Amino acid sequence: MIHAPLAERTDFDWIVASTSRYCDAIVTQPGLNSLLLWSNSPGLTRTSPVLITGWPLILPNEQQRQSIAKLGRSRSVCAVYNKPASDWWTNDDPELTSSSLAQQPLIEYIHGLNTIRKAGGYEIRGNAGAESLWKDDYMLDGVRDLTGERAAVAIPGDLAASAADLSFAFEVNHASLVLSIPRRAEISDEDVAPMEPVVSISAEGRLMIRARAGSYVALPGRASLFDGRWHELSLRRDTAGWVVVLDGSASGRIGELLSAGKPVRYLQLGPAFVGEGPGVAGGWAQFFGKIRDVRLKAVSSNSDAGAGSPSAVAER
């Protein structure tokens, strides 16, 4: 078993979920075969070349061409490129220069693909088939049961910062922490980082939202959410922060999510270790229920509209 801080795992989780949905085959630079293991997809395992981690140092050109031929049998091909990790391996060989590296067939193939999305140190590239399928930024497709578990879903901060809409469905049966942010802006290697609640469910089944740091208000006019039904929650960005939309109805507002004056490192869905503070009791806050279909809609970089304008939203 591998234990890693959620801040480090969040980019990997998103890449696995997204490539599992949109890619028939994956190649990585350097070799990151754990992507295939985490995806738990027999299809990806059969169609994707299994490459040793430092393959640019030792893989002959003919074997690289064989990998390209295997990828050519798939319609939707993605490459996951991590420049810092790749540089770490290639700098290990004094005879390997940037020029000679670029001439390797598989390197040339990967860098000839179009960039689709970036998260942390990872860049996803794809052929025309992958680009045509890529419509949403998915964190999670399907249902994850978080009841009684400390496992959570994390959304990379750089993805959330460019998003106009974060949406997901949830079903709860007890007071629960739904969404939280790190209390500190800097990256931490702590296994358990202290978080601040943003959205939660009260003991009466009411949706509570963060009005400002340490201050929470209940959304008015809603019956208890402990009704055994799925509810859709959306945070829609505008110039003043985020509009909270519950089951299609605008219900409240959250100010811009910042941590110590800086954008958050990640957003956390589900249980979290909550640091003590004004109006917040410290300790583990659980999530009793299920989450499904976590999505982001990104702001189009080609739009002249403001981030809160509907015309600025483009499905990726």
Image (tube, rainbow, N blue to C red):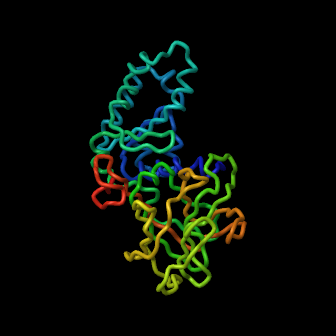
Location of residue 106 with respect to 96 vertically, above or below: below
Location of residue 210 with respect to 56 vertically, above or below: below
Q: Residue at x 36, y 39 (%)?
A: 115
- Compared across the picture, whether 148 is left or right of 246 comes to right
- Compared across the picture, whether 72 is left or right of 251 comes to left
Q: Position of residue 195 (x, y in %)?
A: 64, 60
Location of residue 101 with respect to 3 vertically, above or below: above
Q: Position of residue 170 (x, y in %)?
A: 49, 72
Location of residue 166 with respect to 221 vertically, above or below: above
- Compared across the picture, whether 192 is left or right of 128 comes to right
Classify residue 152 by image quadrant.
bottom right
Total number of numbered labels? 0
Q: Residue at x 49, y 83 (%)?
A: 220
Q: Position of residue 34 (x, y in %)?
A: 54, 43
Q: Residue at x 60, y 50 (%)?
A: 7
Q: Position of residue 309 (x, y in %)?
A: 32, 60
Q: Residue at x 50, y 16 (%)?
A: 96
Along the line of sight, the residue nearer the viewer: 143 or 84 = 84
